[in-house]
Amino acid sequence: MHDLLPYIPQQLSNIRAGLPYFMPELCLGALFILVLVTDLFSGKTSTWLCRALSVAGLLVVIYQCLWQFVLLVSAKQSTVFIFDGMLMLHHTAILFKLVIDVVAILILLYIPWDKALRAHFKGLNDLYSIIIASVLGLHLMVMAVNLLSIYISIEMVSIASYLMVAYRSDTSISTEAGLKYVLFGAVSSAIMLYGISLLYGFSGSLDLFSAMFINGLSAANPTAVGLAITLVMVGIGFKLSFVPMHFWVPDVYQGAATPVTAYLSTLPKIAGFALFCNFLTPFIFFSAKWAAFDFRLFLSIAGIVTMIVGNLAAIWQTNIKRLLAYSSIGHTGFALMALATFSAQGISSLLFYLTVYAIANIGALMLTTHYVNKIGAHDLDSYKGVGLRYPLPSVCFVIILVSLAGLPVSVGFNGKLMVFSSVYQVYQQSHNVWLLALMITGAATTVVSLFYYIKIPLYLFLKKNEHHVEDQLATHQYLLIFICIISAFVLSVGVFPQLLGILQS
């Protein structure tokens, strides 16, 4: 005990020095408590108050994230390690956090428009607080550079995700989806924890960027270290849902409430890729023993297989949410292309691609909610002739699907073009055959994706429904407004490349 006393003032000093760079996360913690207390005293009937507090709180968090840019510039530093190396803050991490916060606001605004959630006996307030807690975990994932903080942040997000998937516990499909998600998540967490224990045993350190960690692993058996790294990647891969850690995706996406599906298909992926970058950096750039080719080989194979499996499996789906689930797996494989470049341009294209994918995917899921609310449409057969009855949302659906497919005159095309450009640039320098294989597979699977994306407009406009279905519920006008805004964003950035330059800057 006496040996620890001299270190206490130093640790307290480290904590105080890191607090200014941790303000967004402190605000999220305070917001989580505020929403819980508001729910406790206002009751489940005042959902608008908890929703307003959640959105306003996230706007404050966005302001704090922007202020972090000022702090880094004023400190004349591009990277800051906080809390004794547990977390790392830099400009790219701030950008990832900003994207997460914006997408989280979209999902919070989307939740009350889901008919099933709105009518649920639990109300919506608990769901708002769970999402705020998960956003805190996502922020920590983006900044985590210590094996302990990596594990804790992933578990924070995982536990919140389990609660969201099983939120409609009175329905069998939601309960089954939640159970599957928990089982797969528990197994992947156990595997990752075992890999972390091996890395700590080899190095004697949990800090990814410490000399002790890097030198310790360099002196250890390469095969054993490679196995440990692979085990940790399994846990991260569960969040990214790349093959073979994708088995849970279709059932969970289908069984969860549609806004929860929007959350699962976007936010954990964004934070997971940021965490992947943090985890791979010390192995690739700070140790000559761990050549970049080994990790590029792993990422290339994972990306190729994920693109092929996700896009081919989506062709045979008739349920819209399952189709979008396999589509998200394919997009994960495409994003792995950018990560495999190990370049600044690759990370930039990765962030842009994930941003435009998240916005378009949320728009597609909003439209599925619109049709479920209107006519109870869950399958493709239910979409027959719907485009003529509801032309505005159906046209918006086509625009968003064009972006998801990566066709020209859409922001999705610009995102895919940036990824291809970054991969090709690195390929010209290294002539790595796996990068060439990634580009060929990416182009081929983009063509394959047209076969299942085009099915939805085909059913909407060209197929006739012999059985007329009456409207079940009037869709809230705000939902249509948001759908139109997302469609306008998707189209305008594709038509006017000048806007793309502003977004890139």
Image (cartoon, rainbow, N blue to C red):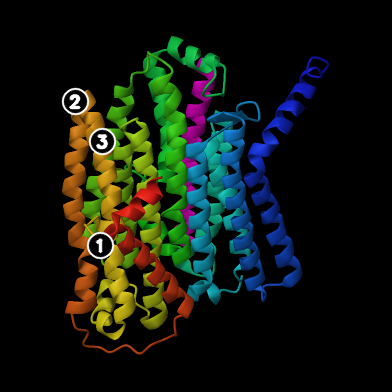
Q: Which residue is disc 2 drawn over? A: 431
Q: Earlier in the sequence, mark 3 or mark 1?
A: 1
Kindly indicate the quadrant of the structure image that contains residue 25: top right
- Disc 1 residue type? Val
Question: How would you rate the neighbour count of disc 2 (Cα within 10 Å): few for under 14, some for 14-19, many for 20 or more?
Answer: few
Number of callouts in the render? Answer: 3
Span highlighted in magenta in the image = 175-202
- Disc 2 residue type? His
| Disc on res. 402 | 1
Q: In this view, does 349 lie to the left or right of 421?
A: right
Rendered view: 461 above or below 421: below
Q: Nearer the viewer, residue 473 or 60?
A: 60
Question: How would you rate the neighbour count of disc 3 (Cα within 10 Å): few for under 14, some for 14-19, many for 20 or more?
Answer: many
Q: Where is residue 126 in the image (x, y as percent from the top left)?
A: 63, 63
Say if residue 324 shows up in the picture: yes
Q: Which residue is disc 3 drawn over? A: 423
State if disc 2 and disc 1 touch (CB < 8 Å).
no
Q: Which of marks 1 and 2 is nearer the N terminus?
A: 1
